Amino acid sequence: MKAPFMLMDCLRGNVGMDLSMTVPPQYKKAFLRGLAKIHVQLSTVLLPKIGTIVSVNADGSYHQGPIPGLGGPFDTATEFFQAWANKTKFGMTDEQLREACGSYAAEIIPSVSSFAKSIGELADTLSVRDDGPFPLCHGDFGHNNIIVDDQYHILSVIDWEMAFAGPWEIFGDFPLTLSIIPPAIDAPWNYNEDGSPKSADLVEQFADQKWYIGAVELEENRNRGNTHYLSEALENPKRQQLATAMRLYQDGKIGTYSKLIDKFMAQA
């Protein structure tokens, strides 16, 4: 009797989901350094188009296919952002959004509703590298998909089913471990009038992001053949935060997305 099957190896270790998604302070820098090394390694896996990898051709090149829900493959970042704007939906129904917003509905709902359209209108300005080659994005890169030992040394990255070659700005989103809601769409009471974060946890998160960029730059410098495209994307806040916002939008994160668009346009 014929039946589908899968062969799997056992890799002994811990996944972030098993560790309450936290990294003890004494292991944090070593863990982030390991993340940076993997992130930079992925930046060297370059494909001519934006899309998934379907198969390997006889000459060793890759046959690329569409990104689920978006289409493609795309020749340019502009095409990708236009497709995202046309096909991506907010991760909540209108009814769920209205109920979740409560008394803030009049401000938040129009802000959310206009975001995808704004991405489409700005599509040809969102990437500093519109043409390929494009780096391989994991699709869910964070310690929820990373196996570590008891000292948080990285053993493996798992769950590659969402991987695709994407624009450098999408690739340059911080690992989920370090992700911060962009201040422009976050609750205003989380920040002081001068824009500085109020909570010690948020201050630490921003410091960790800065440290991570430095770790990426060091890793890029180890090999002369490496570009600095990843670190440049990470340290470009207006584009990096927009990439984060696109991911949060798909996840249904409530926020004032139009304020981020306004900020992007003001800095253009």
Image (cartoon, rainbow, N blue to C red):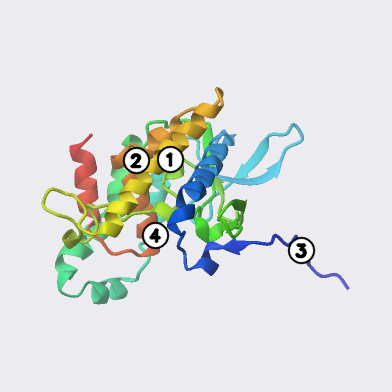
**Rendered image: mark on residue 6:** 3
Q: Nearer the viewer, mark 1 or mark 3?
A: 3
Q: Amino acid at mark 1?
A: Glu
For disc 1, the neighbor class at 10 Å (few under 14, some 14 to 19, many from 20) is some
Q: Nearer the viewer, mark 3 or mark 4?
A: 3
Residue placed at 51% from the left, 47% from the top? 30
Q: Look at the image and tell me whether residue 223 can be seen.
A: yes
Pick whichever, 76 or 268, lies toward us.
268
Q: Quadrant of the N terminus?
A: bottom right
State if disc 1 and disc 2 touch (CB < 8 Å). yes
Q: CA distance from mark 2 to mark 1?
A: 8 Å
- The quarter of the picture where residue 210 lies is top left
Q: Earlier in the sequence, mark 3 or mark 4?
A: 3
Q: Look at the image and tell me whether residue 176 can be seen.
A: no
Residue 199 in the image: x percent, y percent?
A: 23, 59
Q: Which residue is mark 2?
A: 123
For disc 3, the neighbor class at 10 Å (few under 14, some 14 to 19, many from 20) is few
Residue placed at 34% from the left, 36% from the top? 124
Picture mark count: 4
Q: Earlier in the sequence, mark 1 or mark 3?
A: 3
State if disc 4 and disc 3 touch (CB < 8 Å). no
Q: Quadrant of the C terminus?
A: top left
Please state if 95 lies on the left or on the right of 26 as rendered: left
Q: Earlier in the sequence, mark 1 or mark 4?
A: 1
Q: Nearer the viewer, mark 1 or mark 4?
A: 4
Secondary structure, mark 1, is helix
Q: Amino acid at mark 2?
A: Ala
Q: Which residue is mark 1?
A: 79
Q: Amino acid at mark 3?
A: Met
